[in-house]
Image (cartoon, rainbow, N blue to C red):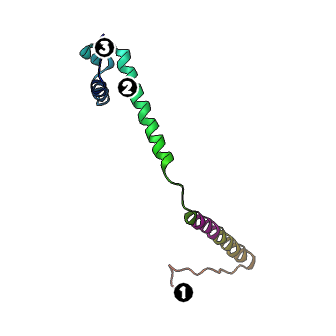
């Protein structure tokens, strides 16, 4: 079996990932086993996943100001829903429309 250096491993993995060739073709081209090529590709893909996961974890948490703004927005939405429901109930109980219709002309 041929001893392969790091640059050649990376070239083999890159050649496989670029598409158009199989593990067996690469193995016969470089004089190694297809199982070894598969192992290198698998290790490379696992390393890529780990790096992405580390990048995701490295993102800083939201500052407290953003969290406060999100909480205020949540409260404002709830307040808006409450007012809308009060208007709907008042219209149902009194039979009078309390909301102004902007799209039509009122005479």
**Marking on residue 106:** 1
Residue 97 versus residue 6: which sits nearer the camera? 6
Q: Residues within 10 Å of mark 2 (few under 14, many from 20)?
A: many
Q: Earlier in the sequence, mark 2 or mark 1?
A: 2
Left or right of residue 90: residue 22: left
Q: Earlier in the sequence, mark 1 or mark 3?
A: 3
Left or right of residue 103: residue 35: left
> Which SS type dominates the magenta stretch?
helix
Q: Which residue is mark 3?
A: 32
Left or right of residue 42: residue 21: left
Residue 104 versus residue 64: which sits nearer the camera? 64
C-alpha distance separating marks 3 and 2:
14 Å
Q: Nearer the viewer, mark 1 or mark 3?
A: 3
Q: Measured along the vertical axis of the image, is residue 27 above or below residue 47?
A: above
Q: Position of residue 16 (x, y in %)?
A: 30, 26
Q: Measured along the vertical axis of the image, is residue 37 above or below residue 57?
A: above
Q: Measured along the vertical axis of the image, is residue 7 above or below residue 83?
A: above
SS at circle 1: loop
Mark 1–mark 3 contact, CB under 8 Å? no
Q: Residue at x 51, y 46 (%)?
A: 57
Q: Is residue 75 magenta?
A: yes
- Span highlighted in magenta in the image: 67-77
Q: Position of residue 18 (x, y in %)?
A: 28, 31
Q: Is residue 53 magenta?
A: no
Q: Measured along the vertical axis of the image, is residue 96 above or below residue 29?
A: below
**Marking on residue 5:** none
**Marking on residue 41:** 2
Q: Residue at x 56, y 79 (%)?
A: 101
Q: Residues within 10 Å of mark 3 (few under 14, many from 20)?
A: some
Mark 2–mark 1 contact, CB under 8 Å? no
Q: In what quadrant of the picture does the C terminus appear?
A: bottom right
């Amino acid at each position: 079996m041929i001893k392969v250096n790091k640059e050649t491993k990376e070239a083999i993995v890159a050649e496989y990932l670029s598409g158009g060739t199989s593990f067996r073709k690469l193995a016969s081209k470089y004089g190694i086993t297809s199982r070894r090529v598969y192992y290198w590709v698998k290790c490379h893909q696992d390393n890529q996943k780990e790096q992405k996961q580390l990048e995701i974890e490295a993102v800083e948490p939201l500052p407290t100001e953003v969290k406060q703004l999100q909480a205020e927005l949540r409260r404002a939405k709830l307040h808006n829903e409450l007012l809308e429901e009060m208007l709907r109930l008042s219209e149902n109980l009194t039979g009078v429309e309390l909301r102004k219709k902007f799209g039509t002309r009122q005479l």
